[in-house]
Amino acid sequence: MRSLPIGCCFALFFACAALAQIQYDASRKVWLITSSHSSYAMGIGPTGQLQHLYWGAPLWRIADVPAAQESHDISSFDPHQMLENEEFPGWGGPRYYEPGLKITRANGDRDLVLHYERHSIQENELEIALKDIRDDIEATLYYRVYPDSGIIGRWAVIRNGTNQPITLESAQSATWYMPRGVSYRLSYLSGRWAAETQLNREPVQEGMKILESRLGHTGHNLNPWFAIDPGNADEQHGRVWFGALAWSGNWRIAIEQTPYQQVRVTGGFNTFDFAYPLKPGESLETPVFYGGYSNSGFGEASRLLHQLELADIQPHGLKARARPVLYNSWEATEFNFTEAGQKELAEKAAKLAIELFVIDDGWFGKRNNDHAGLGDWVVNPQKFPNGLNALISYVNGLGMDFGLWVEPEMVNPDSDLYRAHPDWVMNFPGRPRSELRNQLVLNLARDDVKEYIFNVLDKLATEYKISYFKWDMNRTFAEPGWPEVAPEEQKELWVKYVRNLYDIMARLRAKHPNLEIESCSGGGGRIDLGILRYVDEFWTSDNTEAFDRLRIQEGFSQAYAPKLMSAWVTDVPNMNQRSTPLQYRFLVAMQGALGVGANLNKWTDEDTQLAAKMIALDKKIRDTVQFGKLYRILSPRTSDTTANEYVSRDGTEAVLFGFRHSQEYNTVPPIIYLEGLDAHATYRVESIDNKLPNQQQEASGAWLMQNGLQLQLKGDFDSTLVLLHRVQ
Ligand code: DGJ
């Protein structure tokens, strides 16, 4: 336990934002985890079961938290076990809600009742071991609190201490409980390819709502994030509980309302097609399920998650650099590479002061379309007769770093790799091998496949001056067979695949410390906090159409920080045949990690000049945008105007992005009430294109937040950016 006296806690919340405390009251067997943002309490009930007691705004007095109580059966249909908020229930006894752990023993016995065994506290981490009432089968629960956000990371390690094998049929990371007896609303992100991270809100009702992926990767369809509020929260106000599961494979979050007014959220490995054997002495660690609480609405909930991601999850933490402006030639050339063509684009990119030049799919093997070549990671000699180094040194000579697209988990049947190793793809012998985009998935759960992929990427990163891999993954799993291992071990593939993927990335980064990685999966199919430990940004969506992007980005920002959101400016008309002005496209993309994916050969001088101006502007504001605090002021879902404001960490700079999509005749633009400023400070206010009301040049924080700004946005797809600089 930290050595802080409990009596100073109250002062601690408000004076020392970056402290957290884990207390244990041994006489009543109660734990209280407290940060300046939230508190979380648990206790041991009279029969030894671990009960959840509190999650919400910060508490300072552990004595206020009542000890865990034993309930009584209401009827033979309503056993007392169902009335208790068990922190991590095993599936055993009369328990019917979503368990934390479900097992089968070698002899068929499946009953598991977990009771408290021991605990330890170290700094900001609490470890509580639960054990089956008869057997040496343990679930050790971990709670790590991050003081800056108050977010708690929870995971479990399941250990088989018996001398018989067991099989885990469900291994969850954590169950979160909302306060009882309240009607709640669930927020979650759903979508599909080219329309990821769409925000949904709906009532929580009795029964269960499952958010999940059975796809092998995180998925475009649902993202492992949730928020729950009592139905009255908005961006600025209200109580919001939220969580994000750090797993890039089959995941599951079950939101459940029991008949006893408990609302529980359980997340971990997807139970679908899950069976993980543990031999005597073996253990399995579950993914981390992060959970946090905001007293100030959805906006603050997002900012707390962003803080966690930037400071505590992404590589290099807060020392990470802002994302460089990149150029990617995919939408310009697709597979039609020539060295001369890429050099021409590189020259144009360099003139715009772009910092990273990335070549995409098509540089290797016989990759002239998506029918062949995946797996053959050797430079295509027809496209690059002088080798890749000729292009790389040219790009470096222009002052840009070089990045390369790879899709190492996949193989086209028409490839030398597949011809040599048809057994390396996941498959059920004698069954079809379903192709999607003409490709099959390598079984990365196999250690020989893992080593092969590591060596391929390590060789590329060693032979060439590559500072960035765009790591793509363009299909979902099918026929996930692993015939080389015993039948009872085959389903381990779901877990081992992801662990090996993480392992390759970790080893690559350790060996090539300057290497950066973007997580891409046909757009936003692999966006989650598990892979974030190894990557610097996410490719948000293959849909780069700016107006669609506003909604995709709004959803993305619920859970993920702007720095992590790769966003390109591309040509129009785009995907859905919509055309928007170039400034609008730039300002949409500048709310994340800016990239350009247009065919620069088609740009007019006017386009080029505007682009150079916007890129220079991006470099000026990107620290504020990427590392600052995001305030979503007007939503593209509910207004003809979208407004997002970013305030720098030190509070000296802010930027306001405004977009008007389709003005109805003679309607005035909405007032944008700024947020997160110092009411007593004065700010210099500057619009990049004179769209401020009354050409106002200075204003107090109070005026900007209370009176707001009515930006002069008109017509269709108008846009502006306002810079605020604190002068007093
Ligand atoms: C899907 C990615 O999302 C695109 O950006 C591009 O890299 C293609 N794959 C290339 O095949």
Image: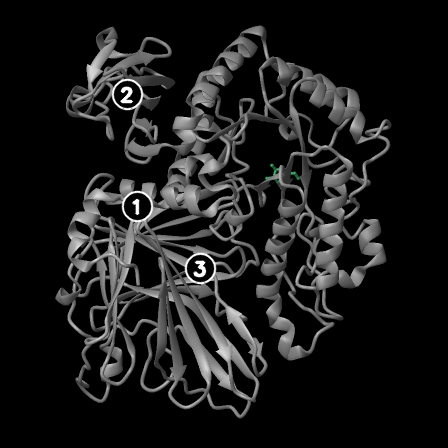
> Three-letter amino acid code at disc 2?
Glu
Q: Between tags 3 and 2, which lies in front?
A: 3
Nearer the N terminus, badge 1 or badge 2? 1
Q: What residue is drawn where x is 86% and y is 31%?
A: 382
> Three-letter amino acid code at disc 3?
Val
> Three-letter amino acid code at disc 1?
Ala
Residue that mark 1 sits on: 18
Q: Quadrant of ligand 1?
A: top right
What is the distance, in whole Å, between disc 1 and disc 3 at their CAs?
Answer: 21 Å
Q: Between tags 1 and 2, which lies in front?
A: 1
Residue 411 visible? The answer is no
Name the foreground residue: 383 vs 726: 726
Viewport quadrant of the N terminus: bottom left
Nearer the N terminus, badge 1 or badge 3? 1
Q: How is the image coloured?
A: one colour
Give how far across and how far down residue 646 sits, in percent. Answer: 34, 29
What is the distance, in whole Å, between disc 1 and disc 2 at their CAs?
Answer: 47 Å
Residue 31, quarter of picture: bottom left
Residue that mark 3 sits on: 288
Q: Using a 10 Å C-alpha cutoff, classify the residue at mark 3 as few (fewer than 14 neighbours), some (14 to 19) or many (20 or more).
A: many
Give how far across and how far down residue 391 sits, in percent. Answer: 76, 25
Nearer the N terminus, badge 3 or badge 2? 3
Residue that mark 2 sits on: 664
Q: What residue is drawn where x is 37% and y is 88%?
A: 133
What is the secondary structure assignment of the residue under circle 3?
strand
Q: Using a 10 Å C-alpha cutoff, classify the residue at mark 2 as few (fewer than 14 neighbours), some (14 to 19) or many (20 or more).
A: few
**Would you place residue 178 above or below residue 695 in this image?**
below
Residue 625, quarter of picture: top left
Left/right placement of residue 577 relative to residue 662 reads right
